Image (cartoon, rainbow, N blue to C red):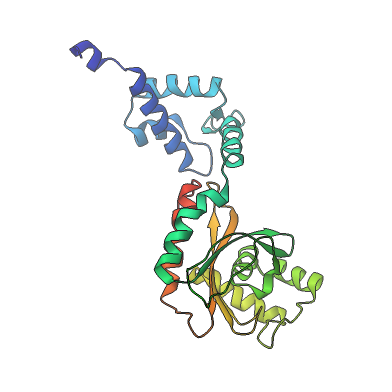
Amino acid sequence: MSATERQSPSGIQVIDRMSQLLDAIARYTGPVSLKVLAAETGLHSSTVFRILGALASHGFVERDEGGGGGYRLGRRLLQLGARVRSGVDIRQAALPAMAWLRDEVGESVNLTIREGDEVIYVERAVPNRMMRVEQIIGSRAPLHVTAVGKMMLGFEGAEAIHEYARRTGLRAFTANTLVDAQRLIEVSAAALAQGYAYDDEEAEQGVGCIGTLVRDATGAVVAGLSISAPIERRRDAWAALLLEASARISAHLGYRS
């Protein structure tokens, strides 16, 4: 490469600078001024202005005409992001981490999605052992009797839980099922704060679970991951492994914590 080529911006260099600018804009919740973006990226203002102009012409950024003239991420990125999400099979994305988690704990690992007031079991990884808990793919369970379901309710907040309780009546499946809305709110909020929830024989006598959430690139909850085992074999130490597996799946879906 000649000295002239090293000094002049190459195609790759322009892409690097575009990426820097998009990342800088994404760090702010509102429009960002050209001056701030130049300072954030270390690029000259004229260079920033030219690149932003090109990005704006393709819809990757938008100018805040009604305010101070700052820049925000454009709708074209949302359109492309939607295509990426629609092309990602959550089950396929989750299977490697699910298999790893199953081998670490020696118990059944489940992937669930929410549909209305229920979770649906869409994938599983089961151990090679005689006595195990095995959920049938396609089976359903109410949110309030599952570890993952309580996390999903906690993510929505107290008012949503009250509405859920009114709709469903909080049917009891075992003597341990949470049938009081206020208690469900407290348990769900505590679970969300610590990052995982328990099912203490609330859906089925003798079965215990630990569950957590899976998120996509937007931070939205798209699935739940859980470990199911006979209650006497369940271990609190599994929580850290569960969170690691969930983080791997979420990262594969584009989530940044």
When asked about the image quadrant of residue 80, the answer is top right
Q: Compare residues 127 and 251 and report the one nearer the observer.
A: 127
Is 202 left or right of 249, judged from the image as shown?
right
Q: Is residue 120 left or right of residue 110?
A: right
Give the residue at x 53% y 78%. 131
Residue at the image point whose x is 62% and y is 31% from the top:
66
Q: Position of residue 232 (x, y in %)?
A: 50, 86
243 in relation to 88, above or below = below
Q: Is residue 97 above or below residue 191?
A: above
Q: Nearer the viewer, residue 76 or 71?
A: 76
Q: Which of 211 and 82 is in front in this view?
A: 211
Q: In which quarter of the image is the N terminus?
A: top left
With respect to residue 129, does 48 lie above or below?
above
Residue 86 location, quadrant: top right
- Where residue 181 appears, as percent x and y from the top left, is 71, 78
The image shows residue 137 at horizontal and vertical percentages of 65, 61
Going 41% across and 31% down the picture, which residue do you hit? 19
Residue at the (32%, 17%) spot, across then down: 10
Q: Residue furthest front?
A: 130
The C terminus appears in which quarter of the rendering? bottom left
Say left or right for 194 vs 14.
right
Q: In the current view of this chain or complex, which residue is farthest to the left?
A: 3
Number of marks drawn: 0
